[in-house]
Every structure is written in structure tokens, then in C-alpha cells.
Amino acid sequence: MRTTTSLQLVTDTRRDHLAGSVARAGSRQARTQLRMGLPADSTGWVNCGQLLSDTAGFAAWRTGLADWLLERYGDAPERTTAGYIMTWYLGVPGYVAALLFHHERRVPSLRPEHLAFRTARPRPHPDSIAVLDPRFVCLPDDPAAGTPEATVVPDERALAAVLRGRFTAHAARFIAAFSPSVRFGRHTLWAAATDALDDSMLLAGRYGGDEGAGVDDAALLLPAHLPPLTSASTTRPAELDRWTRRRESCCFHYLLESGKGPCSTCPRVLPK
């Protein structure tokens, strides 16, 4: 993957309005490190816009993933590496947007050029996400309303629509860049995008200590089937006062473990 070398955006940790939101939202979970801007040493960080412009980075990412899968499972089917990368990449804009919406009622820029990520080792999933633009959309009662960085919308429904639109625009660019190299149809790719939004909002609530609030936000964000996304929120009650959801897409992990079958939330198991 090509790493970020130079960005004329936020590249430090200034405590501006959105930086505070990123820090607060990031502190509410331990799944992924969030930061505002890139560190002084940005080695290993990948700018989403650069990756979508030079898709050789996806091939390198899949190769690294295949090496890890081979070591761990003894196999690395093409559909599985493609499914993992599809899910991981879409989770970058989906998760940072969900965290900031759920905890701060703010929506950052989700343009690919305004997000970067770093992958872990040896399992090469994104473990850190950087927001690179200080501008955001917020509600009228936000303390930063009226500042140059803030754009105000009238209510939560409008804010959710902004998030959905920005994420969908990012996902469309990803699908255009990624689809020529995989054997997935457009429905599968947009199903994965839908999963990224719905699952990220559920996780934001779960890790923040109020899973039900995450479910409410998922319903606000995905109140109905809104194409090109493939469904409304599929969150549903599970055992012991927990929540789960039916996935719209398959990650093809089941191909790695013969006889185990798909995950319990897979659309191959749970029909609509």
C-alpha cells in the first residue's frame, strides 16, 4: 500500500473543536485509535484518497492479508481476502462517522482525501483512523455553532442525512475503484457499505455503554431502504438484553474453516 507523504490539511494535534470531539469519542471505545491529523512520523499511514487513486495498494493489502490467513488457517481464498478488505475499508469512514455522530452529534468530512488509516500487524486490519479536515456539520445548540469550521443543520434527522450522504459518496468512490479487481456484483458491494454504517452505529452504542442508544441512532440513520444502500437498519434484539443485526453481505470467512458454515448473522443464514 502506498503511504501518505504530504497533505495540505490538518497534520498536527491542535485542540480545535473537531479535535476535541475526536478525542472524546475515541476515549469511549478501545476498538480503534482515533486522532485528529497525522502524527509527525506518518510512516505506515495510508490516505484513503491516494489509495482509491492508486488501486495497486489494494492488491498489496490483499497479499499481506493472504499471508496472514495462510499462516493462521492454511488457506486464503480470493473471495475471503476480497471480503475482508471490503469490510475493513468501508469500516474506516463508517466507524469514525458513527462515533462522532453518536457521542458528539457531529459529522466530519468523509471525503477520501480527508481520512487516513494505519493497519495493524500481523493481522492487517485498520487499527487507527485519522481525520484530516477540521470542518464538520452540527446541530444549532452545538457549542461550536457559528464558528468557521461548523455548518449547522436544523435537527438530528437532517444531521443523519448528511452523514448518510457523505458516507454513500465515499462508498461510491470505493466501489468504483475496488470492483474491477474482485468478483463481486454491485449489490454485494453496496450491501457491505450498508453493513459498515449499521454495524458501526451499533458498536458505537455498545462500546459507549448504551447499546440501545446505538440501535436508536442506527434507525435514525437507516430508517428505510434508501438506495443505493440495500436495506434499512437490521438491528434486532438478541439474548440477555443484547442487540444483534443481520448482515447484508458475507465476509466469506466460512471458506477458511471447512464444515463450520457461515456466521450466525450472515444473510446466508438469516433471510430478510
Image (cartoon, helix red, strand yellow):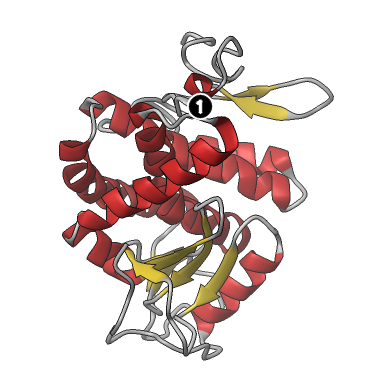
Q: As displayed, is residue 133 above or below residue 235?
A: below
The one nearer the camera, 227 or 8, is: 8
Circle 1 sits on which residue? 253
Q: Quadrant of the N terminus?
A: bottom left
159 left or right, relative to 179: right
Residue 5 percent location from the top left of the image:
30, 82
**For residue 184, what is the image quadrant?**
top left
* Neighbours of disc 1 within 10 Å: few (<14), some (14-19), many (20+): some
Residue 170 percent location from the top left of the image:
28, 53
- Tell me what residue is drawn at x 51 percent, y 87 percent: 16
Residue 7 percent location from the top left of the image:
29, 83
- Tell me what residue is drawn at x 46 percent, y 71 percent: 130
> Is residue 187 visible to us here?
yes
84 left or right, relative to 176: right
188 left or right, relative to 138: left
Task: Name the kind of residue labelled 1 in the image.
Answer: His
Residue 60 percent location from the top left of the image:
31, 54
Q: As displayed, is residue 199 above or below residue 57?
A: above
The one nearer the camera, 66 or 168, is: 66
Q: Give the structural element (helix, strand or loop) at label 1.
A: helix
> Is residue 161 visible to us here?
no
The one nearer the camera, 42 or 122, is: 122
Q: Residue furthest right?
A: 240
**For residue 136, what is the image quadrant?**
bottom left
Q: As displayed, is residue 139 above or below residue 66?
A: below
Q: As displayed, is residue 243 above or below residue 72?
A: above
